[in-house]
Image: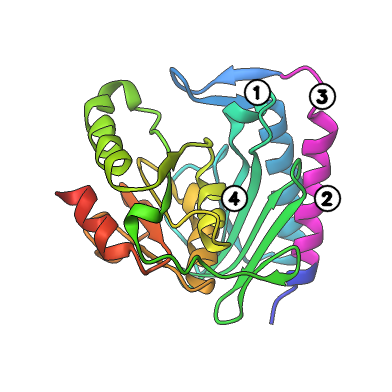
Amino acid sequence: MKNWEKVKELVLEAGEIVKRNWLKPREINFKGEIDLVTNTDLEVEKFLTWNLKQLFPQASFLAEESALHLTLGEETFILDPLDGTTNFAHGFPFVAISLAYAYQKEIVASFLYLPILNELFLAQKGEGAFLNEKPISVSKERDLNKSLIATGFPYSIRQEVDEVLSWMKKILLHTQGLRRAGAAAIDLAYVACGRFEGFYEVGLKPWDTAAGWLLVEEAGGKVSTFANKPYELGHREILATNGLIHSDLSKLLTS
């Protein structure tokens, strides 16, 4: 239906930009008190948006560094050119290019590339999810106490720290452990491939979650709000799990 192979090639090529800049001095600017943007974010976004427009001239773009609004068109690419910018700025290798394609406001294709770790996650609606061309599936763990959970902190953490710490306390007391790598797209991909049983976070934007959302669902998992209601792009909360611990984790977060 679409030029997905060419899109994959563009994402891999964009990853080469990240790799080339990995050991170079960072040019860092602040969008907020702790919200960064680097020259690599801008370079990757410019490369992908320009080249994707050649393949999909009718498509609109919802990209982190240039978005003027959060609405989707008939065809929309949703792009985070460098998820984990703070990680990149500090040389921590959990960084990803996250690209999703939405048709009539439904995510139908995902491309999520971790260039430093050489991991490429792909998904198409109804076609399953893949890591480096091999099928992936969510964890089969049913016991919350044996589950490894991921989370992240919103950029507004200094205003919401008490609520965030309250959730963390509940998770730490009722699971095998809690991890925070600093890149929501990667957390979602790691739920999809079974490395985490679940992930929760607040304050995310559409480009943080779009690609990972499809990956989780195509790998057999479930995505919702904390209260187990249908998730929509831009919702304040996201909860993603293997599906087997979803109800228990939802109850824990909302209790």
Task: Return the mark for residue 68.
Answer: none
SS state under label 2: helix
Magenta stretch: helix, strand or loop mostly: helix
Q: CA distance from mark 4 to mark 2?
A: 15 Å
Quadrant in which residue 76 is drawn: bottom right
SS state under label 4: strand
- Considering the image in quadrants, where does the N terminus appear? bottom right
Quick one: label 1, few (<14), some, or many (20+) residues within 10 Å? Answer: some
Q: Earlier in the sequence, mark 3 or mark 2?
A: 2
User: Mark 1 and mark 3 in contact (Cβ < 8 Å)?
Assistant: no
Amino acid at circle 1: Ala
Task: Return the mark for residue 79.
Answer: 4
Q: Which residue is mark 3?
A: 23
Q: Nearer the viewer, mark 4 or mark 3?
A: 3
Quadrant in which residue 96 is drawn: top right
Residue 148: % across, % down: 44, 50
Q: Which residue is mark 1?
A: 89
Amino acid at circle 4: Leu
